[in-house]
Image (cartoon, helix red, strand yellow):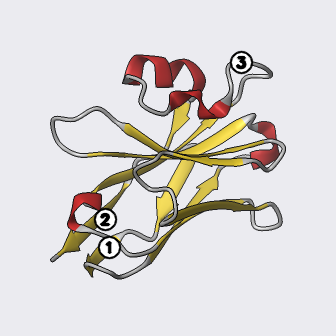
Amino acid sequence: QVPLVESGGGSVQAGASLRLSCTPSEHSSRYRCMGWFRQTSGKEREGLATYDGDGRATYADSVKGRFTISKDNAKNTLYLQMTNLKPGDTAIYYCAADRAIAGPGCETIFGKRSDYVSLIYDIWGQGTQVTVSS
């Protein structure tokens, strides 16, 4: 069973909006952190936005002001609302979560290498492709 399932990706024109969804196989209240990441071929996975157990959202500078992370506990779903999409946003987008009881802050992954990210976020979805054309 896939622990996290992403959906909502697609192909859009620059300037468009998309909303990605992430639904866990178990209740998301079990997770200390949840986050959205993206990866393009040959590059490190990039952290975009995190959401902690207190409902605090944090963002990478590259998406601040354009992307919004949120969680609907009733639907057990994490979202990433993306606006004003650019060709540089083209990537596979992943949802991830941390099942640990305690650890480093959810937002400490921004700008870090994948090996550090994996210390915190230990379960991942399979990804959803987002393609933005000019």
Return the x and y of residue 67 as percentages of the image width and height.
51, 63
Q: Which labelled disc corresponds to residue 10? A: 1
Can you tell which quarter of the image residue 21 is in? bottom right
**Residue at 79% across, 50% down:** 55
CB contact under 8 Å: marks 2 and 1:
yes
**Residue at 22% across, 35% down:** 43
CB contact under 8 Å: marks 3 and 1:
no
**Residue at 59% across, 23% down:** 120
Specify which label sits upstream in the sequence, 3 or 1: 1
Residue 123 is at least partly visible in this image: yes
Specify which label sits upstream in the sequence, 2 or 1: 1
Q: How many marks?
A: 3
Disc 3 secondary structure class:
loop
Specify which label sits upstream in the sequence, 2 or 3: 3
- Give amino acid for label 3: Gly
Q: Is residue 22 above or below residue 61?
A: below
- Give amino acid for label 2: Val
- Give amino acid for label 1: Gly
**Residue at 61% across, 34% down:** 107
Q: Label 2: few (<14), some or many (≥20) within 10 Å?
A: many
Residue labelled with disc 3:
103
Residue labelled with disc 2:
130
Disc 1 secondary structure class:
strand
Q: Is residue 83 left or right of residue 130?
A: right
Q: CA distance from mark 3 to mark 1?
A: 34 Å
Nearest the eye: 75 or 50: 50
Disc 2 secondary structure class:
strand
